[in-house]
Image (tube, grey):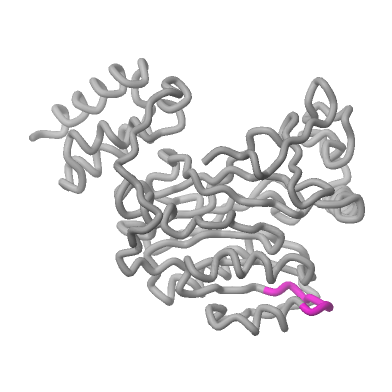
Amino acid sequence: MDIENLKNIIRHHYSDLLEREPDELGLEYYLKLLSQKKISESELIELIKSSPEYMEKNPSVNNEISFSEKKDYSRDSHIIAMYRIKNESRWIRKSLESISDICKEIIILDDGSTDETVKICESFPQVTEIHSQKDLPFDETRDKNKLLEIALKRDPDFIITLDGDEVVMPNSKQRIFYELNVLYPNVSLFEMKEIYVWDEPNRYRCDGIFNNTWSKKLFRLKNQPEDLQFARTKFPGNAHCAAFPDNLIGGTQSVRSKVKILHYGYYDEELRKKKYNFLNKLDPNNTEFDGYRHIFSEESKFSGPNGMEFRLISEIEE
């Protein structure tokens, strides 16, 4: 089938399912998959149906194949977790434990920790490399590209980018492999919802910006360019660098995983104050983030209209 006919197929299904024309990046992405016969037309339809845009328009649609916690969907998938950390001894053990049965390898970049962080990391057999550095200026993009360079030498199938205060929710192993290998075998990028644990182990904040934060954290390496790179940002120290490479093919066509991340970086007042002070020292003239007041204030433009709101983690739906 010629290129123009393939484009028309894509346009037709965009119009039918999303009620719009495909954007340039989406058209290019699906055209490449179809022209190289990596997906069929029916698989194109399922990919569009798995997009956040379609699911938001059709919240009642359940497009899952039968999932069972007892089945093994791993198919020998090689997942590497990448961590960029400094002084994370409080949470890093919990984080590594949450991912150790999912990842074959874990790569650490330690940016000059002075606590027990490195010692804790060394106790995990899945941690196959720790790159240590100190006294370097803060540069999040530089560090993530160093991690990526190390990870790619190990020829993984997937990479997940995590912080030292992030914990994958329990019983996620088969869910992750099911999504990667069964439900979305041609998707390059997966988003995970961040749950901000707040003051108590079973409580999370859910107002404003904390209510619906999705992070693009896990990406597939198949059919990707050899020169994958994390992009620089407009913020000092390249802060707020994305968790996936800027030139990832299919990076605009992510799907939302059912796997969730517990984020402990705001757990108590001490941590919130520490994060607030660090960000304002690094980025003192920021306006886009409203002075980072949402970290502890009810009055930030990123807080909810009714102040801080909380729910129980135990009540989170699958």
Q: Is residue 137 above or below residue 316?
A: below
Q: Is residue 113 above or below residue 175?
A: below
Choose between 316 and 116: the one closer to the eye: 316
Image mark count? 0
Choose between 291 and 123: the one closer to the eye: 123
Left or right of residue 164, residue 215 in this image: left
Q: Residue furthest left?
A: 1
Q: Residue at x 77, y 76 (%)?
A: 112
Give percent across and percent down for residue 110.
Answer: 70, 74
Q: Quadrant of residue 61?
A: top left
Q: Residue at x 68, y 66 (%)?
A: 94
Left or right of residue 28, residue 316 in this image: right
Give percent across and percent down for residue 97.
Answer: 61, 69
Q: Which residues are magenta?
A: 110-116
Left or right of residue 270, residue 117 in this image: left
Choose between 74 and 87: the one closer to the eye: 74
Give percent across and percent down for residue 239.
Answer: 72, 52
Q: Residue at x 57, y 53 (%)?
A: 243
Q: Residue at x 77, y 71 (%)?
A: 89
